[in-house]
Image: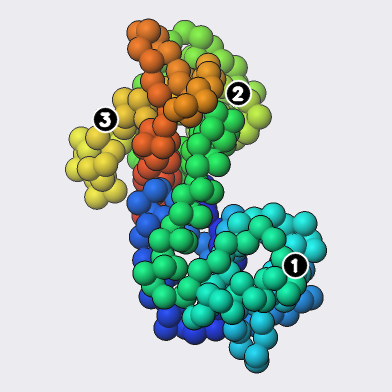
Amino acid sequence: MSIDLNILWFEDTTTWYNNIYRKLERYVKDRNFLLKVTRFDTVNTEQLVKLLHEKHFDVIFIDLNLLGSIKGTSAIEVIRRQNILSDILFYSVQKNDIEDQLSKKFIEGTYVCSRENYEFIPKAKKIIDKNILKTENVLSIRGLLMNNVSVFDQKMKLIISKYLDLATEDEKNSLDRYVEKQGRDFYNKISKVHQNSTSASEGYLKAVLEQERAYVMDSDKLARVVNKIFKMLKSSNDDKYDERYDNFVDNYRSNILKERNLLAHAKTDGVHGFKIENQDGRIITYDSVKCNEIRGNINRYNNLFEETLHKWG
């Protein structure tokens, strides 16, 4: 699950657009977001209304002069009539032309600037930063982690399933023996599911994966099994092994699961965003740097799981 920043952009000069897009894409990537742009070179009211009902846009960029002598103000009017309150950056070669158009149409709540790079890029970055800052609160960061942990659980199940499809009988048995050693409570739960499964003859893990609703393997247990698989790949010099698999479970606990658990007890701090007291009594401040780190870890594990699944077929 990627962390997207969605921009609706009205611009009819492709060369200029491509140049600015690349710069903003790098800027957004440094903040661990994925820039997604929907671009138009003119205004089609019916198409625009339909799009605005189907998709949320964080930021909207609009050039004053569009293809077919269409004015960008017509796009702003359509957007505001749909009660869309996203930040709009309205730009043109001549900034005075923009202000004149806005005053004639009585349009409010819009940023303006020249389309010259030295003015447009800093203004666009400030608006992007403003929208990123909106996501750096307790509820948003906690929700982001919770949602992605659920997605990662499903991806780890797929990794286990794909491994079992490719593994030899000895490797499957080795993995089942590992599961048996993971604790009596875990073993009792997994054995019960195993006995009632149509895949009972295929081992514990296959049985558990078959039962989607059987909450036997939580996030930590899934990570431990995946970690065991990665270790087995390394010890057998399997070409599916990747150096990023080293110390997987310890790193995943620290970077993802621990953060999720800590965020459940977060307290807001009007000055620095929000803060948490961890088990050692140390105060952790979740400012923009920390939130960026969390987004980076989410993206890193998302890429790792996606690339693993793709590589394994």
Residue 192 in view in this figure: yes
Foreground of the two, 56 or 75: 75
Q: CA distance from mark 2 to mark 3?
A: 25 Å
Q: What element does badge 2 sit on?
A: loop
Percent of width and height locating residue 1 = 51, 47
Percent of width and height locating residue 291 = 42, 36
Disc 2: CA contacts within 10 A as few (<14), some (14-19) or many (>=20): few
Disc 1: CA contacts within 10 A as few (<14), some (14-19) or many (>=20): few
Asked whether the beta carbons under mark 2 and mark 3 sit within 8 Å of each other, the answer is no
Foreground of the two, 98 or 200: 98
The residue that disc 2 covers is 215
**Snapshot quadrant of residue 65:** bottom right
Q: What element does badge 3 sit on?
A: loop
The three-letter code of the residue at mark 1 reads Phe
Q: CA distance from mark 2 to mark 1?
A: 57 Å
The residue that disc 1 covers is 106
N-term mark: 2 or 1: 1
Percent of width and height locating residue 39 = 57, 73
Residue shown at the point (80%, 63%) measured from the top left? 81
Left or right: 40 as drawn, with respect to 130: right
Residue shown at the point (69%, 54%) measured from the top left? 85
N-term mark: 1 or 3: 1
Q: CA distance from mark 1 to mark 3?
A: 60 Å
Q: What element does badge 1 sit on?
A: loop
The three-letter code of the residue at mark 3 reads Asn
- Note whether 67 is above or below 259 in the view shown: below
